[in-house]
Every structure is written in structure tokens, then in C-alpha cells.
Image: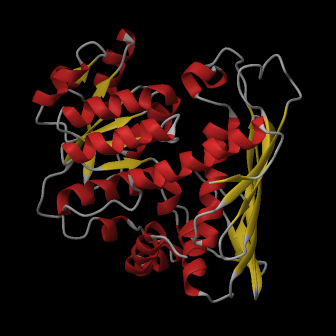
Amino acid sequence: MKTENFVSRRSFVKKTSLGVGATALGLSLMPDLACGTTNKKKLGIALVGLGNYAGGQLAPALQETQNCYLAGIVTGTKSKEAEWMKKYNIPAKNVYNYDNFDEIKNNKDIDIIYVVLPNSMHAEYVIRAAKAGKHVITEKPMAISVAECQQMIDACKAKKRKLSVGYRLHFEPHNQKVIELAGSGEFGKVRYVQSEFGFTIGDPTQWRLKKALAGGGAVMDVGVYCIQASRMAVGEEPVAISAQEFKTDPVKFGDVDETVTWQLEFPGGAIANSTTSYNLRTNEYMVSAEKGRYGLRPAYSYRGIAGYIKEQPMGYTEVNQQALFMDAFAMNVLEDTEPVVTGELGLKDMKIVEAMYKSIANGGKWVVI
């Protein structure tokens, strides 16, 4: 049975299909996503947490957006304040730290707060942002438990604020094509999905290797992309999971999972097999349907994604995924429409993650999701 999330997702793909075609010709998707907002102000975004992703991806992307801009920052590192203020022309009144964060409610320059903190801090700052009257984006994974995800959704609904999760790939044309194919039935029913994403993680002292901050290891960080890939490719919600964990370095990965494989069962009969790792290099997925196969290789990168259909290249031009994602969310706020990526979507992923860890703890036994 198809879910509302993927029905609405396919509707979005259909509405932007002309934009995707333009991308294949080397044109930008941005004007399509900005449609209807040309006479309205740009919305101000404040980034909470100025780590590698905020500095290397989000801030540069906000220099390309049409519906929003980098209006403020929240950081606990004093030296970063002056650096970011100078680099992005941020006024002192829009600079906050974790002690005075709640004062952001009085700042009319800031409409959206983007939480880019360690996973265990997502729930706290999303809830505080909603209470401050701001719309919110949180990085993936949405939180470290289903309970926290629900608290975040409830807090935003209570204040009538919009909530989204940073699943940038929903705005990337190769990924959009896979979703479109799942919904169109052009290749018949999807029978099998193989998805893999892993890399060799560096610094053993970083927060991603501390369970108290990360909530888990590779599964929480990059495994959620494989979960998303399977759900998008099949167009259904999985009903059961079996998962296995492997460690080759029990010292470095003593606190979190290193490599995990899992199998998902879908109600329509499709199965998915996935691997994620902090100690293997892999980045692709393949969809096998009744009338052919297609997929992405590489699949999950910020840049350079490439797709194929029956071994022929999809041929879409590269886009700035983060810019498209933030522009789309700003448009949702401006137009008062439902985000493509909702908090409920992030919650469903966390239900799968919790079931995955339960299966691992029980020796790989199948767990109903």
C-alpha cells in the first residue's frame, strides 16, 4: 500500500518535472522552486552549530538561494563569531550562543532555524526553536529515538511552525527520477533494491564515535540514506527487518556500530538489502524491477551523482542539493504549504532504525516495524 509521504513526493516530482528536464539541458531548477515568491521577502535562516557541514555546505549554498539567506548564527566557539560575521556580513545582533539562544524569539530577521548539532542535541534545539516561534530544519537523523522525533513534531505543531529534516536528495534530479519510476510503473513492480553507503571515518575522538552524542554509528550517520533509498525506490513502507553488525576495530568502534547489513521486507513483495559502514568505501544503489533495472552510482554524494536506466546514463546536470532543499522549505513557509520532507518522514526512518538495533541485539532475528 502506497503511503501519503510518497504520494505527495511523487506529486512534487510531477510538478517540477519541467524543472528536471531543464536541469538535463544545463539549466537551473531554482526558478521553478522560487515560483510565486518573487514579490515576497527572502526569509532569514540561522545556522545552529558551525561545524564542517554548516561551514562547508550550508553556508555556501545559502549564497545561491533565492527564497532565503544566511541571517544569523548560533555557536559556542567565540572565535567563529568574528570569522562568520566578516565572511557572511552577519550583524552582531544576529549572533547567538547556547546560553542566550532563546532570545532569538525577539529577532525578526530570523524566520527559520537550521539545527546542525550532534544528533543527541537535535530534539532539544528543535523544540526550543519552535517555542521561540521559528520554523525549523534539523539535520538527519531527525533525532536518536522515535520518542524524541514525536516530541519535535508535537512541539512544532503546537506552535504552528513547519518542520523539516535535511534529506537533500529529495531535491536531486537523479533521485527524483527513481521516485518517479517507482510511482509510474513504467518498469513494473520493484522486486529488489540493493543500497550501500560507507566510508572510512577518521579522527577517533570525534563526536560521531561517541554514542551519547551520536546515538549510534554508521547507521545513524549514513545508513539513513540507504533506508531512504529503499523507501523511495519501492514507494512503500517496510514491514519487517533483519540486521547484522560486524566490527573489525572493536577499539575505535567500541561505543558505536562500525558496519551493519540489513534486509527489509515490503508489503508488495519487494525486498531490500543494505550495507552501511564507517570502515568500508561504498556509495551506490540498484533497483531491479519486472521490466529492467536502474540505479545511481555514486548515489549519496553532495556532488557528482550519476544514474543509469538499463545501463544508459540518466544524464541530468549537477545541482546544489542543499540550496534547492532550503529554497523549497522557504517556499513552503512563504506559501504555507506542506514540506516535501516532513518530520513524520524522519520519524518513520527512526522507527526502522530502532527495529534494526533490536534485530541486531537479538542475533539478526526478524523484527516487525
Can you see residue 139?
no
Where is residue 148 drawn, in percent x and y? 43, 35
* Image mark count: 0
Q: Is residue 109 above or below residue 350?
A: above
Q: Residue furthest top?
A: 78
Residue at the spot 37% in from the left edge and 49% down from the top edge: 164
For the rendered model, the colour scheme is secondary structure
Residue 218 sits in quarter: top right
Residue 368 sits in quarter: bottom right
Residue 147 sits in quarter: top left
Residue at the spot 70% in from the left edge and 19% down from the top edge: 203
Where is residue 14 drawn, in percent x and y? 42, 80
Q: Quadrant of the C terminus?
A: bottom right
Is 160 or 44 nearer to us in this picture?
160
Q: Quadrant of the N terminus?
A: bottom right
Where is residue 69 drawn, in percent x and y? 27, 44
Can you see residue 50?
yes
Is 134 left, or right, of 312 in this rendering? Answer: left
Is 86 or 184 nearer to us in this picture?
184
Residue at the spot 72% in from the left edge and 72% down from the top edge: 270
Is 109 left, or right, of 182 in this rendering? Answer: left
Q: Residue furthest right?
A: 248
Where is residue 281 drawn, in percent x and y? 80, 43
Is 229 or 329 nearer to us in this picture?
229
Is 304 left, or right, of 133 in this rendering? Answer: right
